Amino acid sequence: MKKILLLLGAVCLSSSAYAVPATVDYIFDGDTFSAGVNIAPDIVITVRVRLINVDTPEMNGACADEIRRANIAKNRLEDLLPVGETVDLQNVKDDKYLGRIDANVILPDGRDVGDVLVAEGLARPYNGGKRKPWCKN
């Protein structure tokens, strides 16, 4: 699996503007989904894709408000990325979890999914490091 991810990374990182098509399979939460990615003719792998540079509330959040907001973000991601939709992955990077990649996800109309979620108040910018809590306590 790691070799396949390295191949995907090499293909994607060969040019930061290069887009890799991916077909949405399943939405996990507000910033992560599963997709089939074409890495070569007749070779499709399924990977988890985390939206790069954004953070949404966690489904197993620390308070009821975070869980409520997580469900809203997940539902919106489901609206933006319906199962079977083909999107482009750009700026693909390895993630800290095996089997998951980080990427900008570009909709067919050219919008960046992370930017949409931030603009709608469902996500916030994130550049690594310690995440800020979503609960007010």
Image (cartoon, grey):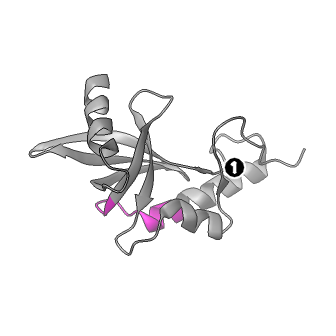
Q: Position of residue 77 (x, y in %)?
A: 50, 61
Q: Position of residue 137 (x, y in %)?
A: 90, 44
Residue nearest the observer in this picture, 17 or 124: 17
Q: Position of residue 129 (x, y in %)?
A: 68, 35
- Rendered position, 91 above or below 3: below
Q: Which portion, as a residue range, is magenta?
A: 76-87
Residue 1 showing in the rendered view: no
State the residue lying farthest toward the left: 42
Q: Is residue 81 magenta?
A: yes
Q: Is residue 37 magenta?
A: no
The N terminus is located in which quarter?
top left
| Residue depicted at x 28% and y 60% | 84
Q: Secondary structure at mark 1?
A: helix
| Residue depicted at x 32% and y 24% | 2
- Rendered position, 84 above or below 44: below
- The residue tagged 1 is 67
Q: Position of residue 36 (x, y in %)?
A: 27, 47
| Residue depicted at x 48% and y 28% | 97
Quarter of the image for residue 75 reads bottom right
- Rendered position, 93 above or below 99: below
* Type of amino acid under label 1: Ile
